[in-house]
Amino acid sequence: MKNRYITLCAALVWALSGCENELDQAPISSGSTPTFFQTANDFDQALTTVYSDLVAYPDRLYNLSEMRSDNLYGVGEAGVRDWEPINNFQTTLATNPYVAEAWATNYNGIFRANTLLDQLAANGSILAPAVRTRYEGEAKFLRAFYYFDLVRTFGRVPLIEKALVPSEVLKVPRTPVADVYNLIIADLQTAIANLPLAYDNTVTADKPNIGRATGSAAKGLLALVYLTRSGPTYGIQGPGLASGEYGKALTLLNEIIASNKYGFVAKYADIFSYTNENNREVIFDVQYISGGTGRGGTLPTLMSPSTYFAAVKIPFAGAEEIKPVSNDLLGSYAATDVRKDFNFQMGYTTLTNFKETRAFERKYLNETLRGVDRFDWPVNFIVLRYTDVLLMKAECILRGAAGSPAEVDAAVSQVRGRAGLGPVVGVTLPQLLEERRREFAGEGLRWHDLVRQGVVLDVMNTWIAKEDTRNKITRNITANSILYPVPQAELTAAPGLYEQNPGY
């Protein structure tokens, strides 16, 4: 799967004329092309293009979640960077390119998934029944994935379940979050029913299955959906519905654990090793391959300042500034916690002998196994891993689902033990949240964790008072800051169709 998974050139093979030209005007760009779907290979290529819109997901998490959270203090020093207004909670983000990318790319993936699903219904008889069933499961998993990302980012979004032409799209208003969730849940339930729990590393025909969506990935995502829906509403039309579905989430998480298809990797660094990809921790990831073919990742470059690459004699041109790790996060690690040195670069000396004392996140950075340029990192990005399943289970129990305090303590102590720390007893929700922060730093989970737990306003406003030493965040954040604005390009494309989120 790795040498076809993020194959952007395959999107060119799928002749969706005008697709890219409309991205700034409507969420879904053009109608389907039923004449393309004539062979089994056509369907396979079409499925590849649905996966291809995952390529920017790690960067999006870094820019819109990690940067937004108390993990980073991203204030630029050489002019205003696109990520700085996100860090500073500015109200002018409707024109921010990172916000626009989140809307456009997710809807491009939804359009491709819808087109494939439409054609499976119309022409899928040319496929073997088992293949047709699996393709439907994968397409619905990905459609749910893209919609869930949209809901967490924007709240209400247009709900589109089939491929539409632009004139039809321009008539679809934003849909209540509960209705979008209904499609997400139905799609993931289909994926669970249609897909195997896991794949091994064997090759089927000329394509390895590793990297494809699985039933376990669908269960893990659905568990996170239930947890997110169960979060508070904050009085906004956002991702939390106060639904109290912790028991549903726990059932799915226990099924993943009981399957024995995945497991706890003993050494923290091994989870993210370039030479240990697709290890037992990995339930779903975004796959990359280097070599100058356009299929490499860019997250390590976003995390790392260009002056660091120059200092270690890596000839990557660029102008990335340091996005410093917050003092609050660094100070939360115990002296013996092995995760701190792995997760962060604790300063460096530039070529001009300037001693940069601030730390930056480097979890996915391996200088010796880099690709040909700064856009060509080979390492996969882990979207869901086994440790997250364990800690989400602990969260469900602490929220009242069936289970014991001993199970919570055991899960957290196992994670701490791998980090070189002692066990704990009587774990509370705040303690669990802080352990998640240390464990998943650099993985883009922190902002969504804070929102889901109902503490984002208190935590962030307290953190701003301590960490905003340059006075760039000029006001207390409110519930309106939980969602990003609808991109201005979408408002302009159909005046009056979408109302802007409050606060922008």
Image: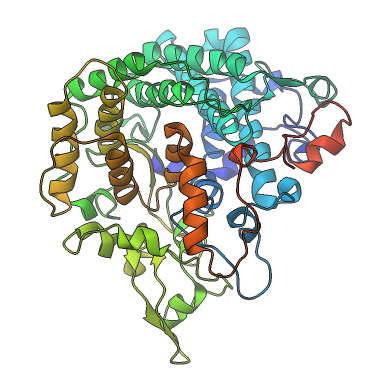
The residue lying at 26 percent from left, 54 percent from top is: 275
The residue lying at 30 percent from left, 36 percent from top is: 388
**Is 92 rendered above or below residue 303?**
above
Q: Say which quarter of the image contains residue 213.
A: top left
The residue lying at 52 percent from left, 57 percent from top is: 464
Q: Would you say residue 292 is visible in this rendering?
A: no
The residue lying at 60 percent from left, 47 percent from top is: 477
Residue 407, how many percent across, how many down?
15, 27
| Residue 382 horizontal side relative to residue 490, left or right | left
Residue 367, how many percent across, how many down?
35, 69
Q: Which part of the image, by quadrant, shows the N terminus? A: top left
Q: Residue furthest right?
A: 495
Q: Residue furthest bottom?
A: 353
Residue 51, how many percent across, how many down?
51, 34
Q: Would you say residue 426 is visible in this rendering?
A: yes
Q: Which part of the image, by quadrant, shows the C terminus? A: top right
Q: Say which quarter of the image contains residue 480.
A: top right
What's the image's color scheme? rainbow
| Residue 127 horizontal side relative to residue 98, left or right | left
| Residue 474 horizontal side relative to residue 243, left or right | right
**Is 144 rendered above or below residue 17?**
above
Residue 46, how many percent across, how many down?
57, 28
- What is the number of callouts on the image? 0
**Is 478 rendered above or below residue 227?**
below
**Is 493 rendered above or below residue 166?**
below
